Image (cartoon, rainbow, N blue to C red):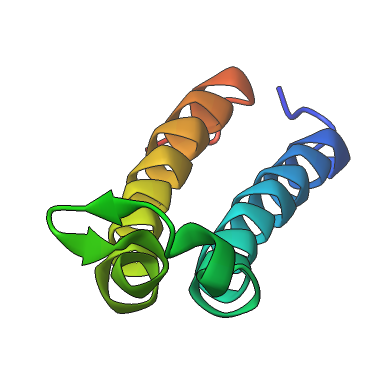
Amino acid sequence: MTKDLSMYWKKNLRYMVILLTIWAVVSYGFGILFVEALNNFSLGGFPLGFWFAQQGAIYVFVVLIFVYYFLMQKLDREYEVDE
């Protein structure tokens, strides 16, 4: 029995757009656009804007990779396309 996979791809695309938007906001927004405002706060002794530009965006990106992995595992099982 094959399911209509168009909904599968729509959900997959929605996941990617949401996660990449989060990544763009964190890396570009927090690391470049809002750096001056974030530098009023500190994390581990470093200004928060500097921290996001140097490390925070990388950490968020790695977390988003795992989130995408788990979302896709669930989606694959839902549409019976898992291995």
Residue 33: which quarter of the image? bottom right
Q: Residue at x 50, y 38 (%)?
A: 72
- Residue 29 locus on image (x, y percent): 63, 68
Left or right for 32, reference 41:
right
Furthest residue in direction front, as rendered: 40
Compare residues 81 and 39 and report the one nearer the observer. 39
Is 62 placed left or right of 34 in the picture? left
Query: What is the number of callouts on the image?
Result: 0
The percent position of residue 52, horizontal first and vertical second, equals 37, 66
Vertical placement of residue 63 versus 79, above or below: below
Q: How far across and down, in percent of the image, does residue 57 sit?
A: 39, 66
Q: From the image, which quarter does the N terminus lie in?
A: top right
- Percent across and percent down for residue 61 are 39, 61
The answer to which of 45 and 76 lies nearer the viewer is: 45
In the depicted structure, whether residue 83 falls above or below residue 2: below
Q: Residue at x 68, y 58 (%)?
A: 21
Rendered residue at 29%/67% (across/down): 51
